[in-house]
């Protein structure tokens, strides 16, 4: 299963609903293009909804890191929402869980973005 | 002691990475591992295949990846070889070091080591052989462990 992404706006925050696999190739490219496109349009508060991401490999992890740092370097913020157990465990063992701002409730995640 | 062995010769393509992962998942299921262990084994093989295809053979159509699975009474042994310049594992930075945490690559070997019981990397001038072992017995024992 490849990855799909769709975006919606909630109180000035762009929520990206992701589903499928973030792996080397198409999945990573979809994520990269989506985040770059949002940033280029000035949408710098990005919440990646990972609730339907059932698999991620090291390339996908790298792409998440890249999205996070790219957003930050452009004065934006990127947070993660609804991690599945697999993705949660992978971010734990790679020590990235504390690097990312991970939320498990959409409404409070949206409120957590700076004004 | 019984043993079953099967091997594949694969092109240096992205399809090989996906195919190696799917085959590993099937082999691990056949060996009796539970879902979590199957995921770990298939992910380790996926990462090894990525290394072989990208970093070893660099997508060279003239270079092949060989993937072998051997099931013994105690172990599932997986060997993947490429025809690249030879991976110097000693030069791979620690992905958990603070200065490397935000790097976008370099976690593949770390994940393989995290998910498998034994990992051996044998580089040579004609390529790299990566051997991974998952103990079948430890899987069965963990299921039988007293509460």
Image (tube, rainbow, N blue to C red):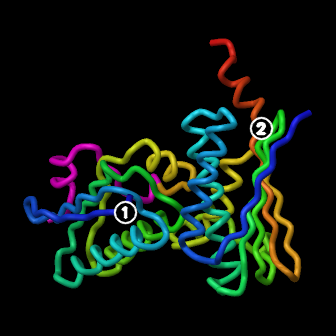
- The mark lying in front, picked from 2 and 1, is 1
Subunit that carries the residue with mark 1: A
* Residue closest to the eye, A24 or B66: B66
> Quadrant of the image for the N terminus of chain B?
top right
Point out the residue furthest to the left here. A11
Seen at 61% across and 39% down, the residue is: B29
Relative to B139, residue A108 above or below: below
Task: State the residue position of label 1.
Answer: A2
Q: For this view, does A83 lie left or right of residue B140?
A: left
Instruction: Count the marks.
Output: 2
Query: Within the magenta stretch, is there residue A108?
Result: yes
Name the foreground residue: B133 vs A108.
Answer: B133
Q: Quadrant of residue B8?
A: bottom right
The secondary structure type at the circle numbered 1 is: loop
Q: Please report the bounds of the magenta region as a residue range.
A: A97-115
* Mark 2, other Cα within 10 Å: few <14 / some 14–19 / many ≥20: some
Q: For residue A36, which quarter of the picture?
A: bottom left
For label 2, the SS is: strand
The residue sitting at the top extreme is B146
Give coordinates of residue A46: x percent, y percent.
24, 66
In the rendered view, does B137 fall on the left or right side of A8? right
Is disc 1 on the same chain as disc 2?
Answer: no
Q: Position of residue A88 (x, y in %)?
A: 44, 47
Residue at 76 percent of width and 81 percent of height: B84
Query: Disc 2 sits on a residue from what chain?
Result: B
Rounded to the nearest angstrom, the CA distance separating label 2 from label 1 is 32 Å
Q: Residue at x 88, y 77 (%)?
A: B124
- Residues at discs 2 and 1 in contact (Cβ within 8 Å): no
Magenta segment includes B125: no
Q: Which mark is residue B135?
A: 2
**Quick check: B124 above or below B97?**
below
């Amino acid at each position: 299963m490849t990855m799909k992404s769709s975006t919606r706006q909630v109180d000035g925050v762009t929520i990206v609903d992701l589903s499928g696999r973030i792996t080397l190739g198409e999945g990573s490219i979809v994520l990269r293009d989506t985040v770059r496109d949002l940033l280029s349009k000035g949408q710098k508060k990005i919440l990646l909804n990972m609730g339907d991401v059932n698999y991620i490999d090291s390339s996908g992890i790298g792409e998440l890191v890249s999205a996070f740092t790219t957003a930050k370097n452009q004065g934006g913020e990127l947070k993660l929402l609804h991690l599945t157990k697999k993705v949660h465990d992978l971010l734990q063992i790679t020590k990235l869980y504390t690097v990312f701002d991970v939320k498990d409730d959409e409404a409070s995640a949206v409120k957590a973005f700076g004004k | 002691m019984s043993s079953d062995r099967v091997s594949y010769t694969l092109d240096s393509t992205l399809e090989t990475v996906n195919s190696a992962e799917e085959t590993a998942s099937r082999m691990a299921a056949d060996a009796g591992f539970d879902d979590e262990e199957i995921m770990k084994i298939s992910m380790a093989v996926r990462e090894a295949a990525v290394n072989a295809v990208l970093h070893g053979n660099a997508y060279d159509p003239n270079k092949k990846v060989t993937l072998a699975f051997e099931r013994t009474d105690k172990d599932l042994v997986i060997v993947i070889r490429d025809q690249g310049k030879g991976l110097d594992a000693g030069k791979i930075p620690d992905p958990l070091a603070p200065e490397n945490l935000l790097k976008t690559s370099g976690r593949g070997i770390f994940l393989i080591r995290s998910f498998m019981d034994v990992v051996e990397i044998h580089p040579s001038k004609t390529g790299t052989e990566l051997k991974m072992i998952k103990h079948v017995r430890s899987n069965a024992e963990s299921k039988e462990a007293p509460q």
